[in-house]
Structures are given as C-alpha cells and as structure tokens.
Amino acid sequence: MKAVARKELQVQLQSLRPVLLAEPNRSFLNLFDEFVEQHEFELALHLVCDFIFDSDSPQVSKSIVDQIQYLHSTMKIDDGCVQKLQSRMPA
C-alpha cells in the first residue's frame, strides 16, 4: 500500500477512536491504537465494529456508521458489518 493511501486510512480510522472511549478499562482502545500503529487497518476497523456490537455502548450516530461504511468500501471489505450496523439504527 502506498504511503499516502496508508496515511489516509490511518486518519480515517482515527476518527472512529472516540467510539472506544466509552469502555471503562480501555482494553479495546489500547488494542485499536496498536493495530493502527502497526498498519493493521482491517483489524482496527473490525475491533470498532466488534466493540459496537458486543458492548453496552451508546447508540452510534449515522455519521459513525457512514464512516465505517466508507472504510469498508475503501478497504474492499464485504463482511455484513455495515448492514448489521444500519439495521440497528433508529428509524
């Protein structure tokens, strides 16, 4: 992956970092930071999705879901995560 594309993904992923601040012990946050630092962007993205699905975190906003959708599309990931998030959005 080119350095410019890698930096763009890193910036986009960092915008999802605040979602993980809802976790009291910060284990997801620490793991996310490590994945991003090591350029394991797919793992970092899936960590955010897993946190949203598996936690008692507050409902995420449409802009967060849109950001996750953009990253899935950019990284060419088609795993059903976005559809699952969209189905949890209030009508």
Image: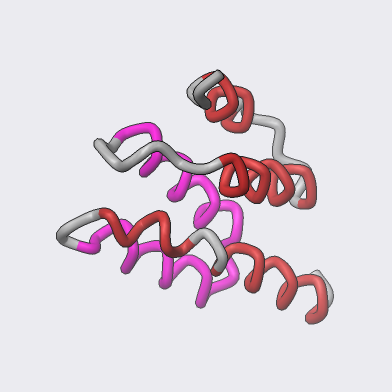
Residue at the far left in the pictured view: 25
Residue at the image point whose x is 62% and y is 32% from the top: 82
The percent position of residue 39, horizontal first and vertical second, equals: 59, 70
Which of the 4 quarters of the picture holds residue 20?
bottom left
The percent position of residue 51, horizontal first and vertical second, equals: 36, 43
Residue at the image point whose x is 74% and y is 72% from the top: 8
Residue sitting nearer the eye, 89 or 71? 89
Which of the 4 quarters of the picture holds residue 69?
top right
Residue at the image point whose x is 65% and y is 50% from the top: 67
Query: What segment carries the magenta color?
Result: 26-54
Residue sitting nearer the eye, 75 or 21? 21
Q: Is residue 46 above or below residue 30?
A: above
Magenta segment includes 50: yes
Magenta segment includes 33: yes
Q: How is the image coloured?
A: secondary structure
The percent position of residue 45, horizontal first and vertical second, equals: 54, 51
- Quadrant into which the C terminus falls: top right
Going by the image, does 44 lie left or right of 32?
Answer: right
